[in-house]
Amino acid sequence: MNHESWMEIALEEAKKGDLPYGAILVKDNQIVMRGHNQTQTNSDVSAHAEINVLRSFTMAVKHYSLDVLRGYTLYTTCEPCAMCAAVCVWSGVSEIVYGASTKELVEIGIEQIDISCETIVKQGFQNIKITPGILASTCLELFKN
């Protein structure tokens, strides 16, 4: 499968959330974990789609280390916020693939902390590949409905 195919699955996950953010974790061409935003549902400001996926994975494998997610790709419908990007650094995700950017969300009136995930990753200590803009317009449409 390609980035667009995986992002389509993340988009379906986003539709399950209380806000339209969805994420999947992929390794060896297999979905390992899925998640969506549950900040309102759980009254938890940290329950972003990316955090939910990474938290669920580390709890499932009952292991935490700074490289537990080496070789894994995180697909997310929107650019990870500063918190989510930092968690990607701490967990050792190898690649982040996202749809809509933080700037695009801000431009349509969605409140965001306007710091790119690339900025956070560059300040960290992991070598994380970032692939932006996959199905970005489709991801943005979820916020316009």
Image (cartoon, rainbow, N blue to C red):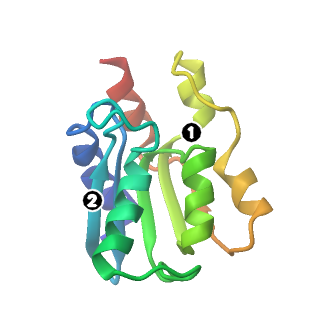
How far across and down, in percent of the image, does residue 141 sit? 36, 27
Amino acid at dot 2: Arg
Task: Report the residue at 32% width, 81% height from top.
Answer: 61
Q: Quadrant of the N terminus?
A: bottom left
SS label for mark 1:
loop
Q: Nearer the viewer, residue 91 or 101?
A: 91
Q: Nearer the viewer, residue 94 or 99?
A: 94
How far across and down, in percent of the image, does residue 71 sit? 48, 82
Label 2, residues with CA under 10 Å away: few <14, some 14-19, many ≥20: many
Which mark, residue 101? 1
Cα separation, mark 1 vs mark 2, equals: 20 Å
Q: Quadrant of the C terminus?
A: top left
Task: Report the residue at 54% width, 48% height from top.
Answer: 80
Q: Nearer the viewer, residue 107 or 41?
A: 41
On screen, 57 above or below 48?
A: below
Amino acid at dot 1: Ser
105 with respect to 126 (left or right)? left
Which mark, residue 139? none
Task: Report the residue at 39% width, 38% height from top.
Answer: 44
Which mark, residue 34? 2
